[in-house]
Image (cartoon, rainbow, N blue to C red):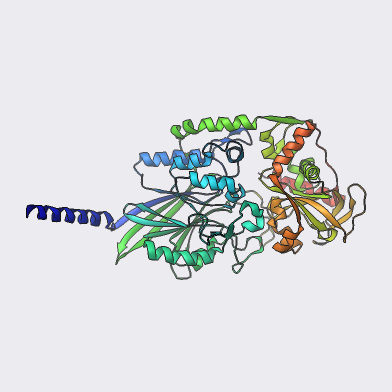
Amino acid sequence: MKRLFFILWCICSVVCFFISCTRKPDKATLTIYCTTDVHGSLFDFDLKQNRPTLYSLAGVAGYLSEERKAGDREYILLDGGDILQGQPSNYYFNYIDTLQTNITAQVLNDLGYDAAAVGNHDIEAGHPVYDKVAGEFHFPWLAANAIDTRTGAPYFKPYTVLHRKGLKIAVLGMITPGIPKWLPQHLWDGIEFEDMIGTARKWVPLIQEKEHPDLLIGLFHAGYNYNYAGENKDTPRNENATMLVARQVEGFDIIVSGHDHQEKVEEITNDAGHKVLIVDARSHARALGKITVSLTRHAGHYDKTYTAELIDPAKAPRDTAYLRKFTPALNQVKAYIDTPIGEFTETLSGREGLFGPSAFTDFIHNAQLRETRADVSFSTVLQMDAKIAQGEITIRDMFNLYKYENGLYLMKFTGQEIDQDHLLNFKKDEQGNIVRNPKGHYVLAADYFNYSCAAGIKYTVDVSRQPGNRVEIHSLSDGRPFHADSTYTVAINSYRGNGGGGHLTQGVGWTKADINQRILKIWDKDVRYYITEYIKEKKVLTPRCRNDWKVIPEAWFQAGKKRDYKIMYESH
């Protein structure tokens, strides 16, 4: 009898234990921190500029260390994606030293991230890189709308469930579906990117039914301006659908967004009449989003109120343990990028590239033409304020000369299809005044990396004419005649050649199928690699402007250049 009583007592104790453990608190306060678009800013050192910087995850590490010392150890830490590209440290651990755990995984694991979204620049690193890193993260990497074409299931984990302070928190991750417009297919082979709204409508009810979360967070690598790049609320697979999902899909309490490098803290009312908080924490660890959620249990559910702010991690004291742990990796990358590859007899500056022919942009053209043997090269100003000093050139300089890991394409165009308009315009408000951003800088009407120029053809840009009729092509650079109905080979980077920036889709009017038919060859390395090889081959170079084009009337050009140059470079 005593034995039976003891057994029953044990059973009751276990049941009571689990009941006590699973009972929801009547009140709770939860803190959520978020970063996004860190782009390799892991250290308090700008590897491109070879100087210390105030903005990196070292600042985030310091801030969180202070919070833990103050007693807050049950916070949630999230990242919105685009972590695998941006600094030479990314390049080194993505492609050079691939045997040890990727430095990105080392850092994010050390900081204790609970979940992250996959970003388009993470996909651009290529399958071998992101597949490896996904296995190295100690937390789930989320993208519910990135579908494995072999199985029909998400390629990455769609969502995760976290437990804090007796609460159950679900986090649903999604990635911008615009990737096929920007990246070569081999980088995302076997993956299809579905519409974010449709994906959210599928997964939110499933999560609610299966998990019954007390809080549902959307972790999206997508911006909130759904009209960007000519899209609108009805555009299928809108690349910046955060606001559309927040309004149209009921169930989200908080959405952490990114991709657009903007700062945003806004509470909206969705179509069902419920509040949704949206937080976007800029980029490059320049901000740490802090969300405080107060929950009060009422009639079987929680009433929730939110406060949110963007914290400046640069003001936080540094975590000495973090610095001590990762300084060896930083020094390893420094040694690699200090490797000499050649010599410039003159200094290269990117400042002239937005106004007319420049040796800086033409250097990229020359490398592309050399590698592809194309008739024409298209390029743009990827670093409008970069400078490479005269003298010894190192691998570090290549990251200033060419910012992105764009691939290299050879395509075929007719003469008529050559891109026809590229002018420097500033965004204006309804009164016609030039718009400034929150930092006081003037804003271009389009992203600077969408202003193109060509090499291999002689042409003029007549700014006295109406837009669309300003460019006149006179001949090929070698003097051969240029014909609108002839076909020419064109060297172009993978972003532009895939339709990014809208030059081929909105400008020329090609469909994605048209673009694929025009691609003659895709190189297996990035443009920066071929520029580096070009310098290694030449050893000593004197960069010269090709002067393949000019802006007329000359008086207009000089007056406009003087005014715009002052706005761009001397107004702040």
Q: Give residue 134's position: percent from left, percent from top.
A: 51, 47
x and y percentages locating residue 525 in the rendered image: 69, 44
In the displayed structure image, the side of residue 517 where residue 230 appears, left or right: left
Residue 428, horizontal then vertical, whole percent: 68, 58
Viewer-closest of 133 and 3: 3
Front one among 57 and 550 = 57
Using residue 554 as the reference point, say whether residue 54 is left or right of it.
left
Q: Is residue 414 left or right of residue 92?
A: right
In this view, the residue farthest toward the left is 1
Q: Residue furthest bottom?
A: 272
Quadrant (top left/top right/bottom left/bottom right) for the C terminus: top right
Quadrant where the N terminus lies? Answer: bottom left
Residue 87, located in which quarter of the rendered image? Answer: top right
Q: Residue at x 62, y 31 (%)?
A: 336
Q: Residue at x 43, y 43 (%)?
A: 112
Tell me if I can see residue 382 in this picture: no
Task: Tell me where residue 207 appears, x and y as whole percent.
Answer: 42, 63
Residue 50 sits above or below residue 9 on the image: above
How many labels, in total?
0
Q: Is residue 455 visible?
A: yes
Instruction: Tell me if residue 218 comes above or below residue 66 in the rendering.
Output: below
